[in-house]
Amino acid sequence: MKEKLQSRGRFVRKLDQVGQLTEAEKKSLAPVGQRFVFRATPYYLGLIDWEDPGDPLRRIVIPTGAEIDETEDVLDASDEASNTKVRGLQHKYPQTALLLVTEVCASYCRFCFRKRLFMDDVHETSMDISEGLEYIRRHPEINNVLLTGGDSLMLSTRRLGEIFRQLREIEHVRIIRLGTKVPAFEPSRITGDAELLRTIAKYSEPRRRIYVMAHFNHPRELTDLSREALRLLLEHGAIVVNQTPLLGGVNDDPDTIAELFNELSYMGVPPYYLFQCRPTEGNDTFKVTLGTGLRIFEKAREKMSGLAKRARFCMSHASGKVEILAISNGQIILKYHQAKNLLDRDRLMVLPLKPDDCWLDDLYRRAAASPGREAAALPY
Ligand code: SF4
């Protein structure tokens, strides 16, 4: 049964306003709300099965008490701050620059690895991108720029058009990417804004495309309205791909991943990455071990067409994007797909794996402690 939301306006900004939560739940979640921001769209709250406390869509946007966890996990698990060259611009891999253009999302994912940006005392985003643009102009090796934050489609259409125009004046920037979960959280932002679609059509040129990096985590997010938003983006010249973390209690089973990736591929939205969930503070209940994650991914791939199984299973580690390739005889085989340090480029690593290992640092710590060939695989 869907209860009426006590929300005025486009967003539900306080847990107190979620009419489906009991008074006891609201009270017990109050400390989480003080540590991490909450926001959700009425549309997305309406997709949740409130009869099921473990509903995957509920887990995506409604906090649990476990977010205040006792682990030593940090807020910036991939050390993104070290890639910040000027305010609002990150440059980690030679060809790619990130412009963090907003700290707002349509809803806030409980597992977000950038939750630090939504805190009052963190200033890594910038509305004024002039310094970032200047940096990009001075770096001809940058051929693609990701507009992110926050969610790039939370910018007004006019602001987005202005950023597109300025980026298109830089010859060497061939691809503009939009990082967004709006097609899942608020698809009417796309279906209801003809000007946005015209703007995308104008700046997604045949030789310099706009890529939409969509973020669907679960097949139930692919509603008719979401599908229509994706169809319109494609029809207006954007290339759309999808990336999702592997999330405990959300999509950590082969059938769910296979259905999500297959459905996306049917619509012409290739699955791009399956990410290992970063060990960010508050994310403990979403973690899936590396061994389990690879088994899920491999089982899911058995149910996919070749077009759906193009995604890579990767960790976005501080040292680079590390692909998880195989496990054999208690060893995990990894390869740098992108590396921050050029010496790590394409580097293959074979490291001992324990059942509870979740992140590259878990493997490094053990390898560093044992002399011999494992230590030789360390990138530091
Ligand atoms: S939409 Fe993206 S940036 Fe925003 S909270 Fe979710 S994962 Fe984080």
Image (cartoon, rainbow, N blue to C red):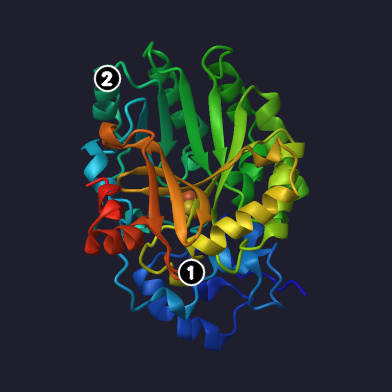
Cα distance between the residues tagged 1 and 2: 42 Å
- Between 9 and 28, the one lying in front of the other is 28
- Residues packed near mark 2 inside 10 Å, few (<14), some (14 to 19) or many (20 plus): some
Residue at 61% from the left image edge and 70% from the top image edge: 6
Kindly identify the residue that appears in the image at 50 percent across and 67 percent down: 286
Residue 108's place in the image compared with 380, above or below, is below
Ligand 1 closer than 8 Å to label 2 CB: no
Q: Nearer the viewer, residue 36 or 295?
A: 295
State the image coordinates of residue 70 (x, y, percent, origin top left). Answer: 33, 79
Q: Could you say whether the residue bearing mark 2 is in a helix, strand or loop? A: loop
Give the residue displayed 41% in from the left and 64% down from the top.
Answer: 37
On screen, residue 110 versus residue 310, left or right, reads: left
**Which quadrant holds the N terminus?**
bottom right
The dot on residue 139 is: 2
What amino acid is found at the position of numbered circle 1 in the picture? Answer: Lys
Place residue 36 in its image quadrant: bottom left
Q: Residue 174: x and y, percent?
A: 45, 17
Give the numbered dot on residue 14: 1
Amino acid type shown at disc 2: His
Badges 1 and 2: C-beta atoms under 8 Å apart? no
Residue occupying image coordinates x 68% and y 37%: 230
Q: Nearer the viewer, mark 1 or mark 2?
A: 2
**162 with respect to 55 (left or right):** left
**Is 226 rendered above or below residue 201?**
below
Question: Mark 1 vs mark 2: which is more N-terminal?
Answer: 1
Instruction: State which quadrant residue 295 falls in.
Output: bottom right
